[in-house]
Image (cartoon, helix red, strand yellow):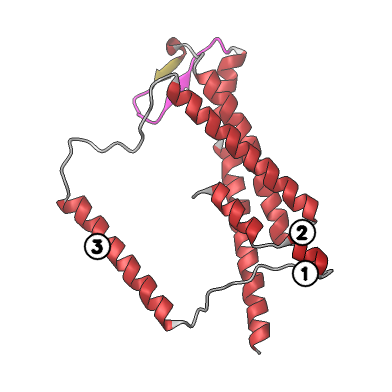
Amino acid sequence: MNSIGLFSGLILATDHESLRRNKVTAGRLKTKLHVNPGCGKGKLLSTAYSTVLGLLAFTLCFFGPQVDSAMALQVHGPPEGLYVHQMAHVHYLIALVFFLWYIRRAAFAGRGWRYLQLFCLFMGLWNILAFAGHFAATRVEAEALVQSSHYLTTMLLPPFSANNLLFYMAKLDHLICAPALFCLFMAIRTFYRSAAAEQGESGQ
């Protein structure tokens, strides 16, 4: 998911200047759906598109060119890979701070906007922790890490320096990232239900 693209879409969906001109309270602002669920032609095209993509993926997986190995992660060597990755964290953090500032400046009210602010806050903290953790990882001695019999388990051996403890804490970033994604899900669901309820009321 391209989060910056999502932020841009949500910003464009709310015309702040029009809101001021019409003197409509921000609390009554709702996202409008432009898709008609009953449109048979659109549904048919969507089904055909999904079918074509599914057949293409099936063909590439079973009849495409054979390779010796297919790795899920591609690690770029230092220092270019680390620099590019850290720059991505900085840009992501800037986008989150701007979006949070925009929501609070426009005084958008409602449960969905509160969830969206929490998402920006949690994900911003995650970016800061990940940014620091990546740099800490470059200073951890190889002897301090011991991999057990299970390939997903790695132990950090003493002595526990400040850098090693920061590296360990950064590995627990899912404790911040998971709540952030949950808040984003709740925000989108709230916007959808509000728009669906508004559409149902206007159709009666």
**Which x, y percent locates residue 35?**
53, 74
Residue 172 appears in the rendering? no
* Image quadrant in which the C terminus is located: bottom right
Amino acid tagged 2:
Phe
User: Does dot 1 land on a helix, a strand or a loop?
Assistant: helix
Q: Is residue 146 above or below residue 117?
A: above
- State the residue at coordinates (59%, 36%): 91
**Which x, y percent locates residue 69?**
22, 36
Ranked by sequence position, the earlier of labels 1 and 3 is 1
Amino acid tagged 1:
Arg
Amino acid tagged 3:
Leu
Ranked by sequence position, the earlier of labels 2 and 1 is 1
What residue would you read off at disc 1? 28
User: Does dot 2 land on a helix, a strand or a loop?
Assistant: loop
Within 10 Å of disc 3 (Cα), the crowding (few <14, some 14-19, many 20+) is few
User: Does dot 3 land on a helix, a strand or a loop?
Assistant: helix
Kindly indicate the quadrant of the structure image that contains residue 135: top right
Q: Is residue 190 left or right of residue 105?
A: left
What residue would you read off at disc 2? 108
**Which x, y percent locates residue 48?**
32, 71
Q: Is residue 116 above or below residue 70?
A: below
- State the residue at coordinates (66%, 67%): 31
Q: Is residue 134 magenta?
A: no
What residue would you read off at disc 3? 55
Residue 38, which numbered label?
A: none
- Magenta stretch, residue numbers: 148-160
Within 10 Å of disc 1 (Cα), the crowding (few <14, some 14-19, many 20+) is few
- State the residue at coordinates (74%, 67%): 29
Measured in 3D between alpha carbons, the distance from the residue under mark 1 to the one under mark 3, in whole angstroms, is: 44 Å
Q: Is residue 64 left or right of residue 137?
A: left
**Which x, y percent locates residue 159?**
55, 9
